[in-house]
Image (cartoon, rainbow, N blue to C red):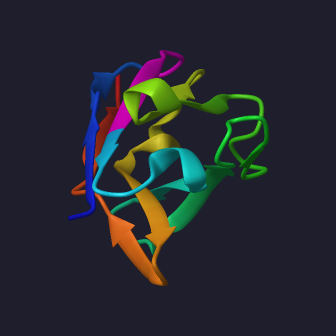
Amino acid sequence: QVRLVESGGGLVQPGGSLRLSCAASGFSFNKNAMSWFRQAPGKERELVGTIDSTGANTNVADSMKGRFIISRDNAKNTMYLQMNLLTPEDTAVYSCSVRWSYSNYWGQGTQVTVSS
């Protein structure tokens, strides 16, 4: 069974940093690209970025480029999202995702709230 579990969310002040984790199981983690998405209240789900299976290549959305860094540790079956210089506009539920065996799988998400 594919399982994705996000953690690390919480309340942080503007300008602060937070690191999210996505623990994966039930599929060949080291064979699959992974993605981070976020969804703010009243908005549609937005792609944060992707990372290839080895972690050598990442793509982050323009609005978050330079502040957000995606990485992975295949030995731990875990993907990370390092978020820096956070603003209130970054407030959202952050979820990880994988496309495996022609289906999309999602974690439950972790809440990130940026507020002074």
Quadrant of the image for the N terminus? bottom left
Q: Was residue 86 drawn as part of the magenta stretch in this picture?
A: no
Q: Was residue 15 drawn as part of the magenta stretch in this picture?
A: yes
- Looking at the rendering, the stretch of residues picked out in magenta corresponds to 14-22
Q: Is residue 22 left or right of residue 72?
A: left
The percent position of residue 77, horizontal first and vertical second, equals 40, 35
Considering depth in this image, is 30 or 47 the residue closer to the camera? 30
The percent position of residue 25, horizontal first and vertical second, equals 29, 48
Q: Is residue 70 left or right of residue 103?
A: right
Snapshot quadrant of residue 112: top left
Q: Can you see residue 40?
A: yes
Snapshot quadrant of residue 104: bottom left
Image point (34%, 21%), residue name: 12
Quadrant of the image for the C terminus? top left
Q: Can you see residue 42?
A: no
Compared to residue 4, the image places residue 55 above or below, namely above
Compared to residue 25, the image places residue 108 above or below, namely below
Image point (61%, 55%), residue name: 33
Compared to residue 63, the image places residue 19 above or below, namely above
Considering depth in this image, is 79 or 59 the residue closer to the camera? 79
Count of numbered circles in the view: 0
Image point (60%, 21%), residue name: 85
The percent position of residue 42, horizontal first and vertical second, equals 36, 72
Considering depth in this image, is 53 or 68 the residue closer to the camera? 53
Image point (54%, 25%), residue name: 82
The percent position of residue 46, horizontal first and vertical second, equals 54, 65
